[in-house]
Image: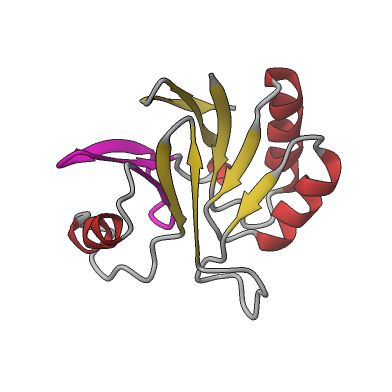
Amino acid sequence: MTKLGLISDSHGAAIRLAQFTDIATHEKFDAVLCCGDGVSDYRSLSKKLSMPVYFVAGNCDYQADVPWELQFDWEGVHCLIVHGHLFASIRYDLTALSYRADEVNAQVVFYGHTHIPKVDLVGKTMFINPGALKDGRYAVIEIENGAIRPKLMEL
């Protein structure tokens, strides 16, 4: 089983980042995924944690030298990480983002931007937004034998 910590939109909230760091250490995540708007926070996080930290740039990450999206496979599940701001209708529906998920054959998409925690299923693709870490929101994702189990959490 793979256990992932998922955060987004930290926006410099140092206390929330410290709280999440303690959780990540205690939970012994296999990795932490960060969906943008806090690249400097995520770089700091990657120095404090013993597990890998993967992150993408968001609309508030000016001149960040990190990618807009990442793709990877865990336990046979193809994953896509984005911030979400490049998909025009993201605040209202997942249509544009679902087209991108289809293009790359993603089975799960991790995204942020809206600050609203939610889990949706569009076709066969699961979309998970942990909400904003600055508001105390994050998610835990368990992947086992192709099954994806998301849990939306609060600090």
Quadrant of residue 123 within the rendered picture: top left
Left or right: residue 85 versus residue 142 is left
Quadrant of residue 149 within the rendered picture: top left
Task: Please say whether residue 113 is one of the residues in the magenta stretch.
Answer: yes
Residue 24 placement (x, y as % from top left): 70, 28
Q: Is residue 121 above or below residue 40?
A: above
Q: Is residue 66 above or below residue 8?
A: below
Left or right: residue 74 versus residue 53 is left
Q: Is residue 52 above or below residue 2?
A: below
Instruction: Tell me the residue at 56%/43% (across/down).
Output: 7
- Residue situated furthest bottom in the rendering: 63
- Residue situated furthest front in the rendering: 76
Q: Is residue 123 above or below residue 149?
A: below
Residue 46 placement (x, y as % from top left): 77, 47
The residue nearer to you, when weighing 89 against 104, is 104
Q: Which residues are magenta?
A: 108-129
Instruction: Tell me the residue at 38%/54% (across/down).
Output: 114
Image coloring type: secondary structure
The residue nearer to you, when weighing 14 against 45, is 45
Residue 139 placement (x, y as % from top left): 50, 32
Residue 76 placement (x, y as % from top left): 43, 34
Task: Please say whether residue 50 is one of the residues in the magenta stretch.
Answer: no
**Which quadrant of the rendered structure holds the C terminus?**
top right
Instruction: Tell me the residue at 52%/66% (across/down).
Output: 58
Left or right: residue 134 versus residue 147 is right
Q: Is residue 11 visible?
A: yes
Q: Is residue 136 visible?
A: no
